[in-house]
Amino acid sequence: MIDATTDKDGICTLVLDQPARSHNLLDRASTATLRRFIEKALTDPKVIGIVITSAKKSFLVGADLDELWSLASAAEAADYSAAVQDMHRLMETGGKAVVAALNGSALGGGFELALACHHRIAADLPDLRVGLPEATLGLLPGGGGTQRLPRLIGIEKAAPLLLKGIQLSPSHALEKGLIDELCAAGDLVDRAKAWILSNPQPVQPWDRAEYKASIDPRIPEGAASFLKLGGDLRASTWRNDHARHAILACIYESAVSTIDTGLKVEQRRFAELMVAPATRNIIRTTFFHTRQARHRATSIDSGKKVAVLGAGMMGAGIATVCANAGYKVMLVDRDQTLADGGKAYAEKVLGREVGAGVLSESGMRERLDNIVTTADLGAVRGCEIAIEAVFEDREVKADIYRAVEEAQGDILLATNTSTLPIAGLAKTLRWPDRFIGLHFFSPVDRMPLVEVIPGMETSPDTLARALAFIRRIRKVPIVVQDERGFFTSRVFSTYVREGLALLTEGVPPALIEHGGRLAGMPVGPLTVVDEVSAATMLSIQRQNERDLGEHYKPAPGDDVLAMLVDQLDRRGKKYGRGLYDYPQGERKRLWPGLAIHFPVSKPDMDVETVIDRLLGIQAVEAVRCLEEGVIASAADGDLGSVLGWNYPASVGGALAYIDGIGARRFVECCNVFAERVGARFSPPAVLKDMAISNSRFHEI
């Protein structure tokens, strides 16, 4: 629905207000409707200009992904893009001024609509955001964003915004040139009309004869700039992000072609990506499955005050996201200095957001004011939720739980443990029905997943309250069974252990690390050992050995960890020496001593074999978790792997990875690896059944 009114000065105001939606979305029907209104205004001799605004809290927040998902072919996707592009060209070449009055966030197709206007005015609101986040979904802006933004603000400033999908606050958007004015929300339409009266026949910069791109790749300096952009992109993505490479190709086109030629290139690239398996994998997992997971929470009240017990990096991160969501937070540690250090960490995190343009200074101060530090555990009084985030020591945790229950008996008590079974921790509690595991991931401010682990005695009410809390702090929950390692730690550990297995087999360490990156993992498995620390991993391993006794199954790399810690004193990055050396002021480098203790005997191993093993072992373990009921669905497994430890989203997650290969072929590969390197690759029964029936975890 669009409400159109024309005032006495001849200015037509179009108010976007799609029925039965909380936000306006771009789809084929709304595009066709908006085009009709624009055509009518452009051909009406009484109309001198157009203002486009919204009746919603937001302006227009992008494409309807349900509709995009339904596009059946590249040709259909190209037609979708062409319809939007043609409407935008009609707006900017119609001979009348068009102003975007951004009363709320304008993202994706919404900001592309604003870019096609001759002037952009935004309300100065703390939650308003503008940007083109399509790269984060494996897509590129298909409504002219890759062509207009570089032409508007210059390639140097536009490239990182497009390639990273950055969303900016109003002040930073103004500073970078994405919008032209800021004003109070109540003055928005009046300011837009005033601009039209002063600029009745504007022309877009790229439609002027004198227009020149900020970088010309046809001269040496410009070519060098694009070579650097391409090199930096390849270095950061390895070979795993086709969308960002397509975006860069479109940016290049903006520098060498007319706007109309560039739009055709963008249209073709958009269509190719829209039907690419990688894009569909990303959208299915990070959008549809995320939406499904978030809807598990009810709208029950999750309280107003949270206590976070432990002010280390995890505790401080949890405190930060709680403060961001409007909670009053009591950040508690054993002494005031440690608690204050946690708040300083929160200030550092929020300061980065201010620097990146996604948060204002006043917003940062408001959130920091929500965090109160103390060394008194009695501060949990009056809190509805307490989250323990101390190191993995059962006795320390038990002491904290006793103090919390004495201070506030009806509190929802959660632990952020990543390794200790919830049932075991609950044994010391008076009210185990109010206890639950909430496993956050580091860094908490950037990692969206929370593993929710009910114990044997956790009540349905506690689970419901926990899910409501997670929804409020804008995280994505998966509910998992209380099994050792839960889901994420259990499966991710196989990646690290397989890297150590390859090391002991004589595979060059550099090949192992490069294989991990080429597979799409954020870091190589040997890097993970150093980041977590071999000492920590060995401590967990030995705790598992004590707990399980004769039922403990040795894992690949057990001996390596013991050697690193007990014999070589190479404990990891924070100790200054591990599988890597960390010379001060220099880049880390693989420790030369690895060649002595793990001599290379397979220098010619195919990197594809390394990739298959590193991704495949995680997939096998994820299937085991599904088979054992640790996770409830393949969707949860994919969400957990992509959002929890950055399993490559381009394959959809640890279970969707099998779909991409095909169950039959994957089982054949597993059987080969099981015979060559160990029974850990033996395919679970459910996989064998899928191979026989040629079935999948997800529909295509």
Image (cartoon, rainbow, N blue to C red):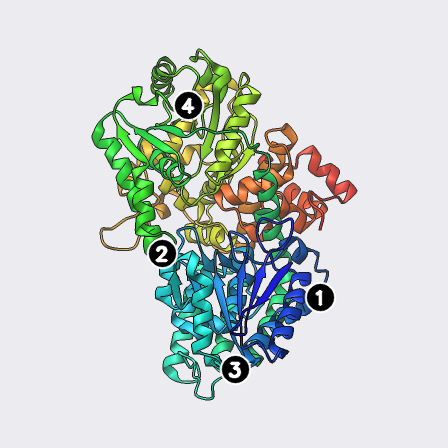
- Marks 2 and 3 sit apart, C-alpha to C-alpha, by 31 Å
- Marks 4 and 3 sit apart, C-alpha to C-alpha, by 63 Å
**Residue identified by numbered label 3:** 257
Amino acid type for the residue under numbered disc 3: Ser
Amino acid type for the residue under numbered disc 4: Gln
Q: Residue 164, how many percent across, how many down?
A: 45, 59
- Marks 2 and 4 sit apart, C-alpha to C-alpha, by 42 Å
Q: Residue 177, how many percent across, how many down?
A: 39, 68
In the depicted view, which residue is nearer to us: 300 or 635? Answer: 300
Mark 2 or mark 1, which has the lower sequence index? 1
State the residue at coordinates (38%, 19%): 394
- Marks 2 and 1 sit apart, C-alpha to C-alpha, by 36 Å
**Residue identified by numbered label 4:** 543
Amino acid type for the residue under numbered disc 1: Glu
Is disc 4 surrounded by few (<14), some (14 to 19) or many (20+) residues within 10 Å? Answer: some
Is disc 3 surrounded by few (<14), some (14 to 19) or many (20+) residues within 10 Å? Answer: some
The furthest residue to the left: 337
Q: Secondary structure at mark 4?
A: helix
**Mark sitting on residue 356:** 2
Q: Secondary structure at mark 1?
A: helix
Mark 4 or mark 3, which has the lower sequence index? 3
Mark 4 or mark 1, which has the lower sequence index? 1
Mark 1 or mark 3, which has the lower sequence index? 1
**Residue identified by numbered label 1:** 76
In this rendering, the label closer to the viewer, 4 or 1: 1
- Marks 1 and 3 sit apart, C-alpha to C-alpha, by 25 Å
Q: Quadrant of residue 428?
A: top left
